[in-house]
Image: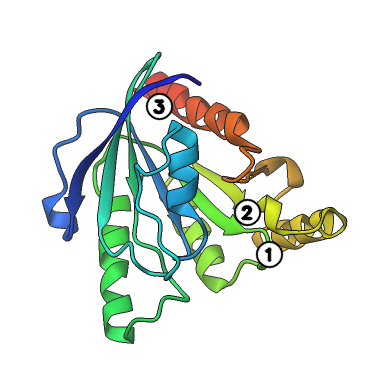
Amino acid sequence: MKVLRAEVGPVVADSKNLPWPQAPEVAFVGRSNVGKSSLLNRLVGRKKLAYTSSAPGKTRLIHFYSVDRSTGRIWFVDLPGYGYAKVSKRESKSWRPLVEGYLDSDRPLAVAILLQDIRRNPGEDEQRLLDWLTVRGISVLVVVTKADKIKPGRREQALRGICSKLALEPTQLVVTSSQTGEGTEKLWQGINSGLEQMRTLA
């Protein structure tokens, strides 16, 4: 997929103040240290479009990114991460209405990207979020991140564990690495499939 231009868009602190929809959207959601920003940067071929931090939980707002491709414009939406962040429980709880407020709103959401670190088994948060999205009829891609961080001999075992926890088949996972670029084209294919499905149903 050829990305012509990618730019930082609106930043939102309250789901009641979401910007007026301008193009189909792709939402990214996952734990706060799952590698969302790095994957976003890899997808658009930019090193510093999305802010990355060594301290989990820095993304506490909804970040929009305008992505112009050879086939048209879309918006990437980086939703606040959950879990692991060293913040108060009160602050953590405040993120849930922000994420659910976006996902439950009337947005032109083509697909939600649920990110899962290959080194960890999915927890209740991931299982509930996958169920929550499915019940609402939102198309979901489960994307495994940081594939380069695990030894090849443990890879298949790790993927089987993720599939077991989320009740998925291995073919339903997109395995990626923002460091090596593995899975980038396959993820773009999944995104394009979601966009095409949206156009078909429109």
* The quarter of the displayed image where residue 54 is located: bottom left
| Separation of residues labelled 3 and 2 (CA atoms) | 29 Å
| Horizontal and vertical percent position of residue 184 | 58, 34
- Amino acid on which the number 2 mark rests in the picture: Lys
Q: Is residue 33 above or below residue 74?
A: below
Residue shown at the point (19%, 50%) measured from the top left: 11
What SS does tag 1 mark? loop
Q: Residues within 10 Å of mark 2 (few under 14, many from 20)?
A: many
146 horizontally vs 135: left or right: right
40 horizontally vs 119: left or right: left
Q: Quadrant of the C terminus?
A: top left
Residue shown at the point (76%, 63%) measured from the top left: 161
Q: Residue furthest front?
A: 47
Q: Residues within 10 Å of mark 1 (few under 14, many from 20)?
A: some
**Residue holding disc 2:** 146
What SS does tag 2 mark? loop
**Residue holding disc 1:** 119
- Amino acid on which the number 1 mark rests in the picture: Arg
| Separation of residues labelled 2 and 1 (CA atoms) | 8 Å
Are discs 2 and 1 less than 8 Å apart at CB? yes
What SS does tag 3 mark? helix
| Separation of residues labelled 1 and 3 (CA atoms) | 33 Å
**Residue holding disc 3:** 198
